[in-house]
Image (spheres, grey):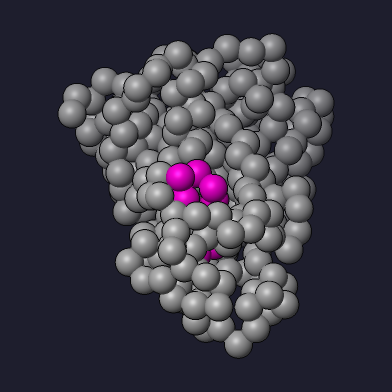
Amino acid sequence: MTTSSTFAYLGPQGTYTHEAALAFATRMGIENPDLLECSSFDEVFECVDRGKCEFGVVGKENALEGPVTATLDNFALKSTATILGEEVVDIHHCLIMHPEARIEDITCVASHAQGIAQCRRFINEQLPGRSTIITSSTADSVLKVMKDKSIASIANAFAAQRYGAKVYTSEIEDHFGNQTVFDLIGRQGHPQVFTGDHYKTSIALFMQQDRAGTLNMILSELAYANINMTLIQSRPTKQALGDYMFFIEFEGNVNEPHIQTALNCLRLKLREVKILGSYPM
């Protein structure tokens, strides 16, 4: 497998991350992308940083669960990768079973922890008394289904199709409108792969010291430059108890003069302003 145009993603095949990787490849005009299966988002970042692949696909934020902390921590603290684009994937959970299984055969339900949590009402009402099994991914739960007719899986129809399982019923999630934002990442300095009229910029901000008014100062600089912030999340720096940094996203391109001015002002007052990427919305 060559590095060029290879996409690292959270496996196994059939995950929502796999689905997002194929969507990115389609947008880039790549019909048959090379895919590198990883066991975690940490491994995806590592593959990109070490040059084992050109692109990586990682989940960044879920509409119900909020930001994906493993991704934010890699961007802020571990990786030098840059964000090249984002893809929003609709999350529709299905109850998936072995092709020969009957609903009466099911004794337990397997899925990723979030899959179980997001379909708790369905499980309680339609499969009362069944135990649950937590798997590393929704796709991994489909693999269990194909080996055991007594297990049902909560995953997407994409995974069922990949492994030859059957979709017993669709859209079983407790809350509709569930979506996940996935980022396409590349090594630092990678040229842009998408163009557009409206851009978003992601940054990580590190304080000189913990003192009153720091967050207000940051927000004031952005507001003074008329920058529309779309996300803010605090994360521990893992250096000391109470030592935090801020992950921020806002509308606009980092090359725009008013944004450069705001970031330069922040650089004078903070320990570090780390640019994670500017990319089309």
Toward the bottom, the furthest residue is 129
**Number of marks in the rendered image:** 0
Residue 55 appears in which quarter of the rendering?
Answer: top left
Magenta segment includes 130 = no
* Residue 100 position within the rendered picture, expressed as x and y whole percent measured from the top left: 43, 64
Q: In this rendering, does residue 100 appear at all?
A: yes
Name the residue located 68 percent from the left edge and 79 percent from the top edge.
124
Q: Position of residue 225 (x, y in %)?
A: 77, 25
> Is residue 259 visible to us here?
no
Quadrant containing the N terminus is: top left
- Residue visible at 31% across and 47% down in the picture: 38
Judging depth in this view, the residue of 49 and 131 nearest the camera is 131
Q: Nearer the viewer, residue 220 or 20?
A: 20
Foreground residue, 258 or 158?
158
Residue at screen point 75% across, 41% down: 219
Residue 137, quarter of picture: bottom left
Q: Is residue 106 above or below residue 152?
A: below
The residue stretch that appears in magenta: 153-161
Could you tell me which residue is drawn at 40 percent across and 50 percent down? 164
Q: 226 above or below 113?
A: above
**Residue 119: which quarter of the image?**
bottom right
Q: Is residue 47 above or below residue 137?
A: above
Q: Quadrant of the C terminus?
A: top right
Front in this rendered view, residue 57 or 157: 157
- In the rendered image, residue 13, in percent from the top left (x then y), is placed at 37, 46
Task: Name the spot of residue 252 as percent of width and height, x first.
Answer: 69, 22
